[in-house]
């Protein structure tokens, strides 16, 4: 049993507790879903369960947490690894080896598993997650979704008694996410493994949970069955009925086009004679399976990657001889990992860094910073060290560092990762506001519901090429995967 007894925790230097007086028991074999808005303390609670709090994250605690009778204050994470496994929000922070096969073996090697058993488990879980073809691939070359699958498979292969999963499907395509959640369900039902799952995409997983814990402001606001907690989730804006806000796009001039783009990594061809036209004030969504090349395509649009064949034209200029830095004023790019964008002492200094590099007149800085902090609901974090924010808050902070420059085209790779439904609505409202001000948005996402509600046009990437997808088809797909809350 996992037990929290009046547990509170405050990060070092933080003005208030992140977790406040939490008492909770999780029995062996339970499937518990932990929900709440971004910043409500869910990730910190997960860290407390496997003793990363207090052994890795500094701060002050009161009360205690025990895992099968072991007090986490005196038991380091390494000693709990056989009992409790953890899959983090950001797979980049969890992967330590250079290739997939070694990564899957790493945890079991540290727990001294016999070699024969290790090989059997690696083979089984690699087949399940379709990772065999990546065994020798350099991990940094994998897509975000592929990295997430590697992290998942590596933890599950150790078969701990409890598995904590913090937003494990946030970068997975719908098919892989459904298969993975079904696998967790079978693992729980057939082998009695305790599952503690944090998710914002509640429509994906609510029906699997025997118990739902709803967190607000670092405390437990509700704890019960799905039926008991559902009204509070709706009242808090964590679930809502489908509502399409996007309007059909009228024809506008082309602001970006890609012609005959061909590109591959080593021997693997990713993009193949790809064609793309983007028109002013569109909100264009690009969908497709994990590893199909969506992120690779986006990196061609601002020159991070250069095609082996073909060209990209941005606002009438061929970017072949232009640097990524010189394109940043017109095209703002936000990748999958927000941590890459956050390095300054405070969020305000992050924004100043962008404005300075884009050579924006200093007289405009205060107005721009006030505007972006307000629209992204980040005003209270103005003087906060960005790395101390929750995953969803870091996502918004990274986005703020891009849109404060007011680029003409905004390119977003998985922008809804780590965002609850309320903050997705805020993101959609921001994109609509920017659209009205003349901005064009291109986004890659696996969130079919977000696409169905807010995109003006949708394209699918398959076989290295793009094809238009009718919005009615996306709405149907969202319904099929449970994307419409009821």
Image (tube, rainbow, N blue to C red):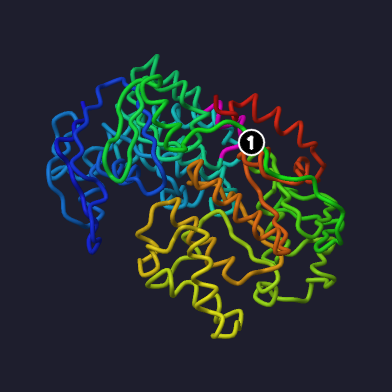
Q: Is residue 355 above or below residue 190?
A: below
Between 10 and 295, which is closer to the camera in this rendering? 10
In this rendering, is residue 2 above or below 367?
Answer: above
Q: Is residue 346 magenta?
A: no
The chief SS type of the magenta part is helix
Residue drawn at point x = 45 percent, y = 21 percent: 208
The magenta stretch spans residue 176? yes
Q: Which residue is mark 1?
A: 243
The image shows a total of numbered marks equal to: 1
Q: Is residue 265 left or right of residue 159?
A: right
Picture coordinates of residue 417 (x, y %)?
52, 46
Can residue 142 be seen at all in this image of the molecule?
no
Which residue is at the front of the view, 289 or 446? 446
Q: State whether residue 407 is above or below residue 38.
A: below
Residue at image position (70%, 71%) is 330
Please give the range of residues in magenta.
172-180
């Amino acid at each position: 049993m996992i037990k929290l007894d009046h547990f509170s925790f405050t990060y070092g230097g933080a003005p208030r507790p992140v977790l406040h007086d939490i008492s909770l028991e999780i029995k062996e074999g339970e499937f518990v879903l932990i929900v709440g808005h971004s910043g409500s303390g869910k990730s910190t609670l997960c860290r407390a369960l496997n003793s990363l709090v207090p052994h890795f994250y500094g701060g002050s605690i009161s009360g205690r947490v025990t895992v099968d009778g072991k007090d986490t204050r005196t038991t380091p994470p390494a000693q709990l690894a056989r009992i409790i496994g953890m899959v983090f929000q950001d797979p980049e922070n969890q992967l330590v080896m250079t290739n997939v096969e070694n990564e899957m073996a790493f945890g079991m090697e540290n727990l001294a598993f016999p070699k024969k058993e290790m090989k059997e488990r690696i083979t089984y879980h690699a087949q399940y997650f379709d990772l065999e073809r990546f065994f020798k691939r350099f991990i940094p070359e994998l897509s975000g979704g592929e990295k997430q699958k590697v992290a998942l498979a590596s933890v599950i292969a150790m078969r701990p008694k409890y598995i904590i999963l913090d937003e494990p499907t946030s970068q997975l395509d719908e098919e892989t996410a459904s298969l993975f959640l079904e696998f967790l369900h079978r693992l729980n039902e057939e082998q009695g493994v305790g599952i503690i799952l944090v998710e914002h995409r509640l429509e994906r997983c609510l029906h699997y949970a025997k118990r739902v814990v709803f967190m607000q402001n670092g405390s437990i606001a509700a704890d019960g069955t799905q039926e008991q907690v559902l009204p509070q989730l709706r009242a808090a804006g964590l679930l809502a009925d489908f509502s399409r806000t996007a309007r059909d796009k009228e024809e506008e001039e082309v602001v970006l086009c890609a012609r005959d783009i061909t590109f591959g990594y080593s021997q693997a061809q990713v993009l193949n004679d790809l064609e793309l036209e983007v028109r002013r004030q569109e909100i264009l969504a690009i969908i497709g399976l994990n590893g199909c090349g969506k992120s690779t395509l986006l990196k061609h649009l601002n020159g991070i990657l250069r095609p082996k064949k073909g060209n990209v034209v941005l606002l009438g200029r061929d970017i072949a001889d232009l640097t990524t830095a010189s394109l940043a004023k017109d095209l703002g790019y936000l990748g999958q990992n927000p941590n890459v964008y956050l390095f300054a002492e405070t969020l305000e200094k992050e924004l100043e860094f962008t404005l300075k590099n884009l050579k924006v007149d200093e007289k405009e800085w205060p107005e721009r910073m006030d505007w972006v902090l307000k629209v992204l609901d980040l005003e209270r974090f103005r003087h906060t060290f960005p790395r101390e924010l929750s995953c969803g808050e870091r996502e918004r902070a990274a986005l703020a560092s891009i849109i404060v420059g007011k680029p003409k085209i905004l390119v977003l790779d998985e922008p809804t990762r780590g965002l609850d439904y309320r903050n997705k609505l805020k993101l959609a409202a921001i994109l609509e506001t920017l659209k009205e001000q003349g901005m064009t948005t291109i986004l890659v996402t696996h969130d079919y519901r977000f696409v169905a509600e807010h995109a003006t046009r949708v394209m699918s990437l398959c076989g290295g090429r793009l094809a238009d997808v009718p919005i009615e088809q996306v709405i149907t797909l969202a319904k099929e995967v449970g994307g419409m809350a009821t």
